[in-house]
Amino acid sequence: TQLLEQSPQFLSIQEGENLTVYCNSSSVFSSLQWYRQEPGEGPVLLVTVVTGGEVKKLKRLTFQFGDARKDSSLHITAAQPGDTGLYLCAGDDNFNKFYFGSGTKLNVKP
Amino acid sequence: KAGVTQTPRYLIKTRGQQVTLSCSPISGHRSVSWYQQTPGQGLQFLFEYFSETQRNKGNFPGRFSGRQFSNSRSEMNVSTLELGDSALYLCASSSRTDRTDTQYFGPGTRLTVL
Protein backbone atom coordinates (compact mmCIF):
# COMPACT_ATOMS: atom_id res chain seq x y z
CA THR A 1 0.00 0.00 0.00
CA GLN A 2 1.42 3.34 -1.07
CA LEU A 3 0.76 5.78 1.75
CA LEU A 4 1.78 8.78 -0.30
CA GLU A 5 0.46 9.20 -3.84
CA GLN A 6 2.23 11.60 -6.14
CA SER A 7 0.82 13.04 -9.33
CA PRO A 8 1.55 13.32 -12.09
CA GLN A 9 4.05 10.50 -12.49
CA PHE A 10 5.65 12.12 -15.53
CA LEU A 11 5.73 15.70 -16.71
CA SER A 12 7.43 17.06 -19.81
CA ILE A 13 7.20 20.81 -20.32
CA GLN A 14 8.91 23.65 -22.14
CA GLU A 15 11.27 26.05 -20.44
CA GLY A 16 9.36 28.98 -18.96
CA GLU A 17 6.16 27.08 -18.18
CA ASN A 18 4.71 26.69 -14.70
CA LEU A 19 3.86 23.37 -13.09
CA THR A 20 2.46 21.86 -9.92
CA VAL A 21 3.21 18.46 -8.41
CA TYR A 22 0.90 16.93 -5.83
CA CYS A 23 1.53 14.62 -2.90
CA ASN A 24 -1.59 13.15 -1.27
CA SER A 25 -2.33 10.81 1.59
CA SER A 26 -5.14 9.73 3.88
CA SER A 27 -2.68 9.74 6.76
CA VAL A 28 -1.54 12.64 8.91
CA PHE A 29 2.17 13.43 8.99
CA SER A 30 4.09 15.40 11.58
CA SER A 31 6.28 16.79 8.81
CA LEU A 32 6.70 16.39 5.11
CA GLN A 33 9.81 16.72 2.97
CA TRP A 34 10.40 17.33 -0.70
CA TYR A 35 13.50 16.02 -2.42
CA ARG A 36 14.95 16.31 -5.91
CA GLN A 37 17.02 13.47 -7.28
CA GLU A 38 19.20 13.35 -10.36
CA PRO A 39 20.08 10.06 -12.08
CA GLY A 40 22.64 8.00 -10.16
CA GLU A 41 22.65 10.34 -7.18
CA GLY A 42 20.91 10.41 -3.82
CA PRO A 43 17.85 12.59 -3.21
CA VAL A 44 18.70 16.13 -2.15
CA LEU A 45 16.46 17.80 0.40
CA LEU A 46 14.60 20.86 -0.89
CA VAL A 47 12.36 21.71 2.03
CA THR A 48 10.69 20.44 5.20
CA VAL A 49 7.20 21.65 6.08
CA VAL A 50 5.80 21.14 9.53
CA THR A 51 2.75 23.29 10.22
CA GLY A 52 -0.63 22.71 8.58
CA GLY A 53 -1.26 25.41 5.97
CA GLU A 54 2.41 26.35 5.88
CA VAL A 55 3.77 27.85 2.66
CA LYS A 56 7.50 27.98 1.97
CA LYS A 57 9.19 29.65 -0.96
CA LEU A 58 12.59 28.75 -2.32
CA LYS A 59 13.32 31.06 -5.26
CA ARG A 60 10.98 29.81 -8.03
CA LEU A 61 9.70 26.88 -5.95
CA THR A 62 6.68 27.20 -3.67
CA PHE A 63 5.77 24.41 -1.24
CA GLN A 64 2.49 24.11 0.59
CA PHE A 65 1.47 21.77 3.40
CA GLY A 66 -2.25 21.06 3.60
CA ASP A 67 -4.23 22.34 6.57
CA ALA A 68 -4.82 18.79 7.81
CA ARG A 69 -1.18 17.81 7.23
CA LYS A 70 -2.20 15.02 4.85
CA ASP A 71 -1.13 16.52 1.54
CA SER A 72 1.34 18.87 -0.04
CA SER A 73 2.07 20.56 -3.32
CA LEU A 74 5.15 21.84 -5.08
CA HIS A 75 4.74 24.65 -7.60
CA ILE A 76 7.54 25.69 -9.92
CA THR A 77 7.33 29.02 -11.72
CA ALA A 78 9.08 29.56 -15.03
CA ALA A 79 10.69 26.12 -15.11
CA GLN A 80 14.27 25.82 -16.33
CA PRO A 81 16.16 22.81 -17.75
CA GLY A 82 18.11 22.69 -14.48
CA ASP A 83 14.85 21.78 -12.70
CA THR A 84 14.81 18.45 -14.52
CA GLY A 85 14.85 15.49 -12.14
CA LEU A 86 12.81 13.15 -9.99
CA TYR A 87 10.80 14.92 -7.30
CA LEU A 88 9.97 12.89 -4.22
CA CYS A 89 7.79 13.71 -1.26
CA ALA A 90 8.26 11.95 2.06
CA GLY A 91 6.19 12.03 5.24
CA ASP A 92 7.23 11.43 8.82
CA ASP A 93 4.50 9.76 10.86
CA ASN A 94 6.27 10.62 14.12
CA PHE A 95 6.35 6.92 14.98
CA ASN A 96 9.83 6.19 13.67
CA LYS A 97 8.79 5.79 10.04
CA PHE A 98 9.28 7.79 6.88
CA TYR A 99 7.05 7.12 3.88
CA PHE A 100 8.01 8.04 0.34
CA GLY A 101 5.85 8.81 -2.64
CA SER A 102 6.55 7.10 -5.96
CA GLY A 103 7.97 10.29 -7.42
CA THR A 104 7.30 12.70 -10.28
CA LYS A 105 9.75 12.65 -13.13
CA LEU A 106 10.07 16.16 -14.55
CA ASN A 107 11.70 16.98 -17.86
CA VAL A 108 12.09 20.63 -18.82
CA LYS A 109 12.97 21.10 -22.46
CA PRO A 110 15.01 24.13 -23.54
CA LYS B 1 28.93 19.86 8.64
CA ALA B 2 29.91 16.95 6.41
CA GLY B 3 27.05 15.13 4.70
CA VAL B 4 26.20 11.45 4.58
CA THR B 5 28.92 9.40 2.92
CA GLN B 6 28.58 5.99 1.34
CA THR B 7 31.25 3.61 0.15
CA PRO B 8 31.84 2.25 -2.33
CA ARG B 9 30.00 4.34 -4.94
CA TYR B 10 29.97 1.55 -7.51
CA LEU B 11 30.16 -2.21 -7.16
CA ILE B 12 29.97 -5.09 -9.60
CA LYS B 13 29.36 -8.59 -8.26
CA THR B 14 28.24 -11.93 -9.64
CA ARG B 15 25.28 -14.03 -8.60
CA GLY B 16 25.81 -15.96 -5.38
CA GLN B 17 28.39 -13.59 -3.97
CA GLN B 18 27.85 -11.39 -0.96
CA VAL B 19 28.41 -7.67 -0.56
CA THR B 20 28.85 -5.17 2.26
CA LEU B 21 27.99 -1.50 1.86
CA SER B 22 29.01 1.21 4.29
CA CYS B 23 27.35 4.42 5.43
CA SER B 24 28.65 7.23 7.63
CA PRO B 25 25.86 9.49 8.85
CA ILE B 26 25.97 13.21 9.54
CA SER B 27 27.80 13.89 12.78
CA GLY B 28 25.38 13.74 15.70
CA HIS B 29 22.73 11.74 13.84
CA ARG B 30 21.85 8.50 15.54
CA SER B 31 19.36 7.11 13.05
CA VAL B 32 20.44 5.47 9.81
CA SER B 33 17.99 4.07 7.29
CA TRP B 34 18.67 2.04 4.18
CA TYR B 35 16.65 2.07 0.98
CA GLN B 36 16.75 0.18 -2.28
CA GLN B 37 15.86 2.15 -5.39
CA THR B 38 15.06 0.56 -8.73
CA PRO B 39 13.36 2.03 -11.81
CA GLY B 40 10.38 -0.29 -11.44
CA GLN B 41 9.79 -0.20 -7.69
CA GLY B 42 10.97 3.24 -6.70
CA LEU B 43 12.37 3.83 -3.22
CA GLN B 44 11.79 0.84 -0.94
CA PHE B 45 12.61 0.89 2.75
CA LEU B 46 14.99 -1.82 3.94
CA PHE B 47 15.59 -1.08 7.62
CA GLU B 48 16.39 1.59 10.17
CA TYR B 49 18.95 1.51 12.93
CA PHE B 50 18.94 3.78 15.94
CA SER B 51 21.62 3.62 18.62
CA GLU B 52 22.87 0.27 17.35
CA THR B 53 19.40 -1.35 17.39
CA GLN B 54 17.27 -2.22 14.42
CA ARG B 55 14.09 -0.27 14.97
CA ASN B 56 12.15 -0.88 11.77
CA LYS B 57 12.33 -3.35 8.97
CA GLY B 58 10.84 -3.41 5.48
CA ASN B 59 9.63 -6.39 3.48
CA PHE B 60 12.91 -7.80 2.24
CA PRO B 61 14.21 -11.35 2.56
CA GLY B 62 16.65 -12.34 5.27
CA ARG B 63 19.51 -12.12 2.78
CA PHE B 64 19.46 -8.40 3.50
CA SER B 65 20.87 -7.52 6.88
CA GLY B 66 22.49 -4.58 8.56
CA ARG B 67 24.14 -3.33 11.67
CA GLN B 68 25.10 -0.09 13.32
CA PHE B 69 28.20 0.65 15.32
CA SER B 70 28.62 2.76 18.43
CA ASN B 71 29.81 5.71 16.31
CA SER B 72 26.51 5.47 14.34
CA ARG B 73 28.22 4.24 11.19
CA SER B 74 26.19 1.52 9.54
CA GLU B 75 26.80 -1.38 7.22
CA MET B 76 24.41 -3.29 5.05
CA ASN B 77 25.06 -6.82 3.87
CA VAL B 78 23.44 -8.77 1.08
CA SER B 79 24.24 -12.45 0.85
CA THR B 80 23.71 -14.85 -2.06
CA LEU B 81 23.24 -12.05 -4.55
CA GLU B 82 20.57 -12.34 -7.22
CA LEU B 83 20.25 -10.47 -10.50
CA GLY B 84 17.25 -8.61 -9.07
CA ASP B 85 19.40 -7.10 -6.35
CA SER B 86 20.92 -4.73 -8.90
CA ALA B 87 19.90 -1.30 -7.67
CA LEU B 88 20.95 1.98 -6.16
CA TYR B 89 21.28 1.51 -2.39
CA LEU B 90 20.72 4.68 -0.46
CA CYS B 91 21.52 5.47 3.11
CA ALA B 92 19.83 8.29 4.99
CA SER B 93 20.54 9.73 8.39
CA SER B 94 18.39 11.75 10.75
CA SER B 95 18.67 13.08 14.25
CA ARG B 96 15.30 11.75 15.42
CA THR B 97 15.32 14.26 18.24
CA ASP B 98 12.82 16.91 17.23
CA ARG B 99 9.49 17.40 15.53
CA THR B 100 11.02 18.72 12.30
CA ASP B 101 12.95 15.55 11.74
CA THR B 102 14.30 15.13 8.24
CA GLN B 103 16.27 12.44 6.48
CA TYR B 104 19.44 13.39 4.64
CA PHE B 105 20.62 11.06 1.94
CA GLY B 106 24.01 9.95 0.82
CA PRO B 107 24.97 9.68 -2.86
CA GLY B 108 24.21 5.97 -2.93
CA THR B 109 26.02 2.81 -3.93
CA ARG B 110 25.23 1.51 -7.40
CA LEU B 111 25.29 -2.30 -7.21
CA THR B 112 25.31 -4.32 -10.40
CA VAL B 113 24.88 -8.09 -10.17
CA LEU B 114 25.98 -10.07 -13.22
Image (cartoon, coloured by chain):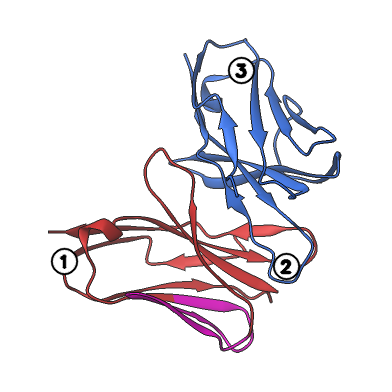
**In this rendering, position of residue B105 left or right of residue A94:** left
Q: Which residues are magenta?
A: A52-73
**B57 is higher (above) or lower (below) than B96:** above
What separation in Å lies between label 3 and label 2 (alpha carbons)?
Answer: 33 Å
Q: Check disc 1 and report the residue beneath it.
A: A15
**A69 is higher (above) or lower (below) than B46:** below
**Going 29% across and 60% down the picture, which residue do you hit?**
A83
Check disc 3 and give the amino acid type.
Leu
Q: Residues within 10 Å of mark 2 (few under 14, many from 20)?
A: some
Q: Is residue B37 magenta?
A: no
Check disc 2 and give the amino acid type.
Asp
**Going 26% across and 57% down the picture, which residue do you hit?**
A82
What separation in Å lies between label 3 and label 1 (alpha carbons)?
Answer: 43 Å
Q: Residues within 10 Å of mark 1 (few under 14, many from 20)?
A: some
Q: Check disc 2 and report the residue beneath it.
A: A93
Task: Depth check: give the residue in front, B76 or B93.
Answer: B93
**Label 2 SS:** loop
